[in-house]
Image: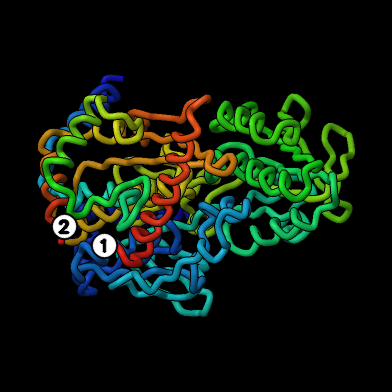
Amino acid sequence: MRESISLSRRQLLALSGAALLPAPMVMAQGRPRVVVIGGGAGGATVARYLAKDSGGAIEVVLVEPAHRYDSCFFSNIALGGFWEFSALGHGYDGLAGVQLVQDWATGVDRDARRVALGGGGSVSYDRLVIAPGIDFVEGAVPGWDVASQQAMPHAYKGGSQIRVLKAQIEAMREGGTFALIAPPNPYRCPPGPYERASMVAHLLTQSNPTAKILIVDPKESFAKQALFEEGWQNHYPGMITRIGPDFGADTVEVRPETMELVIDGEVEAVDVCNVIPAQQAGMIAAQAGLTDETGWAPVRPEDMRSRLDEAVTVLGDAAAQGDMPKSAFAANSQAKVVAHALRAELTGGTAPAPRYLNTCWSLIAAHDGVRVGATYAPAEGKITALDSFVSQPGESAERRRQTWLESVDWYRAISADIFGSSSS
Amino acid sequence: MRRGIWGVAVCLLIPAGMGLADDAATLAQQCVTCHGAEGEAIPPLAGLPEADVTAALLAYRAGERPDALMQVVAKRLSDDEIAALAAYFEGLGP
């Protein structure tokens, strides 16, 4: 089915020329319409910037089922008790000029350029932007599926799951074991699972100091490893153990009913288990036929346009773009490049040369912040890292405190930049 | 192989010059991800004197002002872009 559609599209392109195809459609509908699926760091930024900078020349529709966005970024900070959960919530009222369709996008007919909605209707587009974030790979951790998420929370998509996890940690028996099943690469927020372990250790050090944390990791190594391991040694000596693939961590099985792990044939009873499964592009990207065998959506590095459909852009966590990590910062940075490219294409003009930037901050303990980041540009068919930086082991407490304060300022600034509250 | 090398060369050249649509407001969109309306560790930029922003960015780019993050950001800015950004942020002041 999909093949015959893309074949007819290719034939059409061959007849009319790629550059000519959009123009008649745009004119037929008056203002060109961009539909954005997903109101997170990528999608909301694209929608806001397109509406703001096109001065009404582009009709911008954002399809997002939630009334409120609870950010996954900084949810570890709330888990650790440094912030209230309510501080992670953002409304869509600040997206001036954006038409909000509060519904699920349930499918994309790329031939008809139409997005089907859960409520039964549909919305047509001239250009589609898909920013669905991640979904979990089914069966990635044997014994676990979404139906087990109350017993063994993932807490990796923001929202209520992180509260469930915190309540379980607080209710844990004295001297109990908190297990964290880390995901294989690539996944959202590379330092996230290790910041998570740090925040759990911070909680347990105060409330349950004889408790243990077991990280079961399918990877040989992980992001900011030297910094985390130094921090764990300094702040939480003896509390955190990590086992890697050498010890069977890549084939772990879980039993949510009995709260057990099976590692290399050995059954281990645990008290709380945070399962962060392997990930892939949010479901709608796969349903639209825009993902490849890796489960992610391949895009061009110049403008995040899908390699499989020139009318569709995929950005943020769902995109396979090259070197950028899957982060809110990266999605926001990509979104600005996308907005420039779409505005240039639909209303005329030249898009500036794409520049991308990312920084990932992590908190290891109170006032002990670390960061890693880089600048990026398209090169050799992918988004390629140019210059990078990373916090160093043994930095002064004052430097670390500054890095933590920086991350708080970043959260406030990027939230305003994504959702349009208060700032420009 | 040859195409790959040219790809890199073109990418390194483009950010150094100002494209037609590469105006200061567009460039500044990269800054506001971190520089918000308030900030303890990351200063707000709106209204800062042009000379101060220019001096800071030039010093970051030369590696003479400490901050690894701002150094890699400034390294990708040309003299013209630094001047345009500095004027833009001063112009946002009260």
- Determine the residue positioned at 37% across, 31% down: A385
Q: Residue A360 location, x and y as percent?
A: 46, 41
Furthest residue in direction front, as rendered: A398
Structural crowding at the residue carrying mark 2, measured as other residues with C-alpha within 10 Å and reported as few (<14), some (14–19) or many (≥20)? few
Front residue of A216/A137: it is: A216
Extreme-top residue of the structure: B2
Q: Quadrant of residue A131?
A: bottom left
Label 2 SS:
loop
| Residue shown at 47% from the left, 46% from the top | A327
* Amino acid type shown at disc 1: Ser
Q: Is residue A234 left or right of residue B27?
A: right
Residue B30 picture location, percent across and down: 28, 47
Q: Are marks 1 and 2 in contact (CB under 8 Å)?
A: yes
Determine if marks 1 and 2 fall on one subunit.
Answer: no
Give me the chain letter of mark 1: A
Q: Is residue B84 left or right of residue A402?
A: left
Give the camera-side residue of B93 and B34.
B93
Residue at (75% x, 36% y) in the render: A239
**Which residue is located at x 85 percent, y 52 percent?**
A173
Q: Which mark is residue A202?
A: none
Which of the 4 image quadrants contains residue A45? bottom left
Residue A359, position as x, y percentages in the image: 41, 40
Q: Image quadrant for the C terminus of chain A?
A: bottom left
What number is the disc on residue A424? 1
Location of residue A201 with respect to A116 vertically, above or below: above
Given the image, on which type of amino acid does mark 2 rest?
Leu
Residue pointed to by mark 2: B92
C-alpha distance separating marks 1 and 2: 10 Å
Can the viewer see residue A14?
Answer: no
Residue at the far bottom in the pictured view: A120
